[in-house]
Image (cartoon, coloured by chain):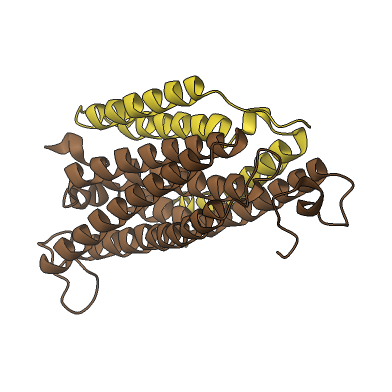
Chain colours: A yellow, B brown
Amino acid sequence: MAEHIVPIRIYSIIFAALLALTAATCAISFLNLGRMNAVVALVIAFVKALLVALFFMHLRYSPRLMQIVIIAGLFWLGIMIALTMTDFLTRGWLTYR
Amino acid sequence: MAAIQTAEYSAQAHQFDSLEQQTDAATLGMWVFLVTEVMFFGGLFTSYIVYRSLHSFAFAEVSRQLDIVLGTTNTVILIWSSFTMAIAVYCAQTGMRRLNIAFLVLTILLGLAFIGIKFYEYYQKFVEHLVPGPSFSFSAPFTKEAEMFFTLYFAMTGLHAVHMIVGVGLLSWLIIFAARGRFTPVYHSPVELIGLYWHFVDIIWIFLYPLLYLVGRHLE
């Protein structure tokens, strides 16, 4: 694969987007949205992480193999969190007699 | 690392068919390492999720002890340093050696500013008796939950700070090698790979910031 050089203009746009999202997440956290506070904060964090990975880390231009490795890694992280939480969130369901 | 020289033919190790294949292999190796790092931090994130789900109101209440101004400043500094790192990689790719070094230095300075602010925050928490241990004190009813929150806070930001310090070391090494003219538009894998590491550490902070600093702001 020939090396892909990302132009400075794209880096600048991503940088501006990351700063805007940081300001947004900080401002929104002061509003009382109930359970949505955590959801909004995490969605913004995921978008920021995705922008960093795709453009700063060149993932968008990387070979398919690398993208699969990362998705597999995140999948395993998902398994760890999901299986742990199926335990903790369901403990109260049990009744012992 | 003896094979690293400025000319294309000597930068390539003999087991690779081409420099391109070598670069791809090195980049893939770095990504595999970063995936292990995801799992390393993932353990801490999982324990955070467990305790936050068990004590969500207490965590929101206690998290307001953190200084949001310093936390947000550090977030901006770290994103800025990722930007300068990306530019440094661009300069290495296009063979602008002086600018490459300049942006690496700028990245280090921003990294050091982050670490400095982080340690000032640690100092504040120490003074306020918010470091878990015998002298920990927090008003009832959330004393135990507060100690749990701050244990996670110090473990997560501490591990992140260690990664920052390692990153500053790696960048210093890059600057020395860049100053010796070891990187060319053809061979600059170390700049790219350490860049990946630096961006990864940035991503970890992107998640730590809302999880630790922004949890309970709406309660005021």
> Does B50 appear above or below B88?
below
Q: Nearer the viewer, residue B30 or B126?
A: B30
In the rendered view, does A73 fall on the left or right side of B81? right
| Residue B153 lies in quadrant | bottom left
In the rendered view, does A52 fall on the left or right side of B15? left
Q: Nearer the viewer, residue B138 or B158?
A: B158
Residue A63 position, x and y percent, is: 75, 34
Could you tell me which residue is drawn at 37 percent across and 59 percent down?
A: B161
Could you tell me which residue is drawn at 35 percent across and 33 percent down?
A: A41
Residue B218 seen in the figure: yes
Residue B119 position, x and y percent, is: 24, 61
Q: Nearer the viewer, residue A31 or A73?
A: A73
Q: Residue furthest bottom?
A: B134
Could you tell me which residue is drawn at 35 percent across and 26 percent down?
A: A21
Residue B26 position, x and y percent, is: 72, 50
Residue A62 position, x and y percent, is: 69, 33
Residue A94 seen in the figure: no
| Residue A36 lies in quadrant | top left
Could you tell me which residue is drawn at 58 percent across and 47 percent down?
A: B191
> Does A39 appear above or below B113?
above
**Quarter of the figure with the N terminus of chain A:** top right
